[in-house]
Image (cartoon, rainbow, N blue to C red):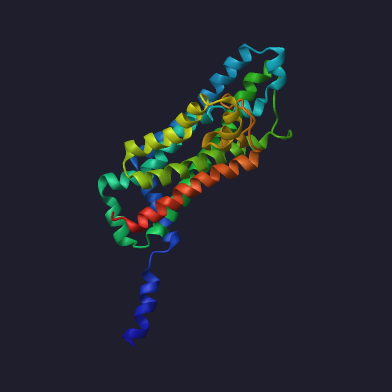
Amino acid sequence: MTTSTAPARAARFRPLIADLARSEWIKLRTLRSTGWTLLAAAVAMTGFGALLCAAYARHLTPATRASLDPASYSLSGFFLAQLAIGVLGVLVMTGEYATGSIRSTLAAAPQRLTVLAAKAAVFTAVAFTIGLASSFAALFLGQAIFAGKGLQAHLSGPGTLRPVFGAALYLAVFGLLALGIGTLVRRTAGGIAALIALTIFVDGAAGALPASWQHSLVRYLPSAAGQVIIGRTKFTPPNPLLSPWAGFGVFCGYAAAALLAAAITLHRRDA
C-alpha cells in the first residue's frame, strides 16, 4: 500500500509551473528594485519620447514632415526604456545569485528548467504589460505635441496600433534576452555590461564598417532587427532594414539563443 501511494503523493506535491510562476511573481513583486526600474521604464518611454517629439516638431521642414511617421516617432523613448527593462531582466536571476537564495529556490524546485521557464513567463508578462501601458501613454503625448503642427495619428488609423504593440513586444523580448544573459553571467554588473555591449555598442560599432558591410550586416544585429517592428523612430538605423515581422523574428532568435544557453548552463552548473 505504501509503495503504490508514494508516487501519487510525490506527484501531488511536486512543484508545477503554476506554483513556480506564483512564487516568482511574489519574488518579483517584493524585489526592491522592481518598482523603481519599471517606473523608470515608463517615464523613459513617455517623458523621453515626448522630449524627442517636441524637439523634432520645432525643426520640421517639408522634407522631414513628409518622411515623419508620427505614431512610430512618438515611441522613440523605447531606447531608454529598454535599458530599465534590461537591468530588471538581469536582476531577476543575478539578484538570487547575489543573495544566495538561488540555492533555496533550486532546493525547493529541483526542476531547474521549469524554474527558468517560470521566471521567463512572469517577467515577460510584467514587461509586456508595462511596455504596452507606457506605449499608449507615449503615443497620446506625442500626438498632442504633433497636433500643433498639423500632424497626428489616430488609433483607428492604419498602421497606428502596430508600433504601440510592437514597442511592448520589443521590450518584453529585450527583457527575455537580458534574463538569459543574467543567467549565463550570474553577476549583475557583468550581465548589464554584456547586454549593453550586445544591443547598443555593437550597433554603434557597426557604423564604422564599410558601407557594403553595413547594408548586409546591420539589419541582422539585435537592436536594429528588433526595433523595426516599432517603425521609424529617432533611433532607426539609416540602412535598409528587414521587414517588421522578419526583423522581430530575428530579434526573438537572439533571445531564444540566450535562453537556450542559459537553460543548458543552469542545468549543468552548480548553483
Q: Quadrant of the N terminus?
A: bottom left
Image spot of residue 60 (x, y percent) = 66, 13
Q: Residue at x 47, y 51 (%)?
A: 121
Q: Residue at x 49, y 40 (%)?
A: 174
Q: Quadrant of the C terminus?
A: bottom left
Q: Residue furthest bottom?
A: 1
Q: Residue at x 72, y 19 (%)?
A: 66
Residue 30 visible at all: no
Q: Residue at x 52, y 26 (%)?
A: 209
Hey, which quadrant is residue 72 in on the image? top right
Image spot of residue 45 (x, y percent) = 52, 29
Residue 210 visible at all: yes
In the image, residue 255 above or below residue 237: below
Q: Residue furthest left?
A: 100
In the image, residue 154 above or below residue 28: above
Hey, which quadrant is residue 226 in on the image? top right
Image spot of residue 162 (x, y percent) = 65, 38
- Compared across the picture, whether 69 is left or right of 83 comes to right
Q: Nearer the viewer, residue 85 or 23?
A: 85
Q: Nearer the viewer, residue 160 or 199?
A: 199
**What is the tally of numbered marks visible in this picture?**
0
